[in-house]
Amino acid sequence: MAIATIRPLYFCTIHCPLTTNHCPLKSSPPMNTDYIDLQPWQVGIAAALILISGAISLLLRLGLERRLLVASVRTVVQLLLVGWVLEWIFKPNQPWYYVLGMLLFMTIIAGGAAVTRCERRYRGVWLDSVISMGISSWFIGAVAVAAVIQVQRHEQTWYHPQYCIPLMGMILGNTLSGISLGWDRFGDELAQKRGRIETLLALGGTRWEAALGAIQVAVRTGMIPTLNTMMVVGIVSLPGMMTGQILAGMKPESAVLYQIVIMFLIAVGTTLGTVMVVLLSYWRLFTPWHQFIPGRIFPKNGKKH
Amino acid sequence: MTALLQALDIARRHPAGDSWLLDRVSLEIRAGDRAVVSGPSGSGKTLLLRAAAMLDPIDAGAVLWQGRPIAREAVPRFRAAVIYCHQRPAMLADTVEEALRRPFALKIHRAKKFDRPWMLERFARLGKPDSFLEQPVANLSGGEMQMVALLRALQLDPQILLLDEPTAALDPKTAAEVEELAVDWIERSPDKRALVWVSHDVAQGNRVATRKIYMENGSVKEEG
């Protein structure tokens, strides 16, 4: 998976004020005009380019025209909507619970999205995904805001949305892939290696000994995309966040520092989220009596039995 | 004498409906028992054995080991003494020797050691050369895998073996050798060991059994 995983979900719509200063940590300067404000017709030009994809779909009979249309409309609507919501949350002196509410909403949506991508389900998978998403991202997000960037020293409030929301957006977006890959692979492994797991249990293995192989494969699978991204970041492609900051006028040398911080945050966030979702599902599918209950797993579009 | 293993009124509901996979089945295994369980497919033979090894959750009933219920943390110890052998066993490794050594990596068996001479002697009785140890498990037939799985369980010195059609994939001659191996294992200390054997083969039942259990529709229909 390439750089695309580091989706600046909520970033590019934000007018980044970190620009005029060499030090991005100084109290926020007034909105500057280092970037070019886009007019609707300019956006229209870019949007019109999607017709090329449409033409190719028609030409090769890919049958993707409808999806292209829906995807395009969704992109525009969703981003305009989020821009509007952020604009509102970014108003000065908004109470803290607006920001927290937004973060909570983002966490739940991300937790749900992680499950929708998976082929297998079990009762409680949604809750487990949201819990894993919440604990890992909020922990990493808190460290980022309070210890790394130290927002409270530069702004009046720690919950300053300009930092919280884009940071959490990126952490959540990446943790989402980790959780989704982690459970997807864990479910696969359990289904494929059922005989192996049951044989180990029958020979006196504990549930942990029986599941360990599958747990290792699943956690590794969840972590690898982030590691791969870290390997090539800056060489093969420029991360979206950094690109956004540079577009907004930040000096590249400041932008890369932010990017380095982000890379570490998402690496740890992804690891934690993946481990958590795998462990939570392990506890649901293996009983304290060292029994494995594959019957609790059911396919995405199937009934529970 | 207390039974080694008691399954008391075990019931297990069908996950989809109100029917029962196991309908209040009781089974008592005493030392020296060679119980053969038979019955049509889907009658609950495998489920009974799995329930007896506590491998599946049950909806009602209890499993007692030496007269006592089994605590959560004692389950691995219980399963080291009461080993269920799957009909299609997983080999857990790449070669026969690794497959046979795999259980010793489990915490519960760590004190024991792989006994090569003991194993080679068993091989000889089953007509397998020493080089069988180096065989990749990918080359084994279904019957050979069952043989390896049985030896893997036997070497752990269990009290009770729960064998799920252990000779279903073997030719009659090898099947007879496997029977002999299992019976010999019991005969060596009949005061401590017992065997439960699921089999469709009537003749085999007659050869192996000291007790016969016939199951139908999730319950024991006849015992004798």
Image (spheres, coloured by chain):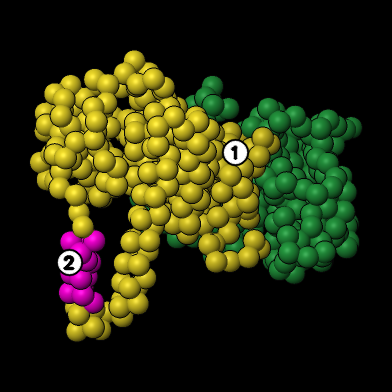
Residue A206 showing in the rendered view: yes
Measured as percent of width and height from the top left, residue B32 is found at: 78, 40
Q: Which residue appears at 88% of the width and 49% of the height?
A: B9
For the C terminus of chain A, the image quarter is bottom right
Whether residue A249 sits left or right of residue A153 in the image: it is: left
Q: Residue at x 89, y 32 (%)?
A: B1
* Left or right of residue B26, residue B103 in this image: left
Chain hosting mark 1:
A
Residue A283: in magenta span: no
Name the residue located 69 percent from the left edge and 47 percent from the top edge.
B56
Is A42 inside the magenta-drawn segment? yes
How far apart are the alpha carbons under marks 1 and 2? Answer: 52 Å
Seen from the viewer's position, the closer of residues A242 and A175 is: A242
- Coordinates of residue A293 in the picture (x, y in percent): 63, 49
Horizontal and vertical percent for residue A280? Answer: 55, 38
What tint does the image give chain A?
yellow
Query: Residue A45, labelled with which disc?
Result: 2
Chain B takes which shade in the image? green
Q: What span is in magenta? A: A40-54
- Count neighbours of disc 1 (C-alpha within 10 A) and say few if under 14, some if 14 to 19, many if 20 or more: some
Judging from the image, what secondary structure is the residue with disc 1 in? Answer: helix
The residue that mark 1 highlights is A283
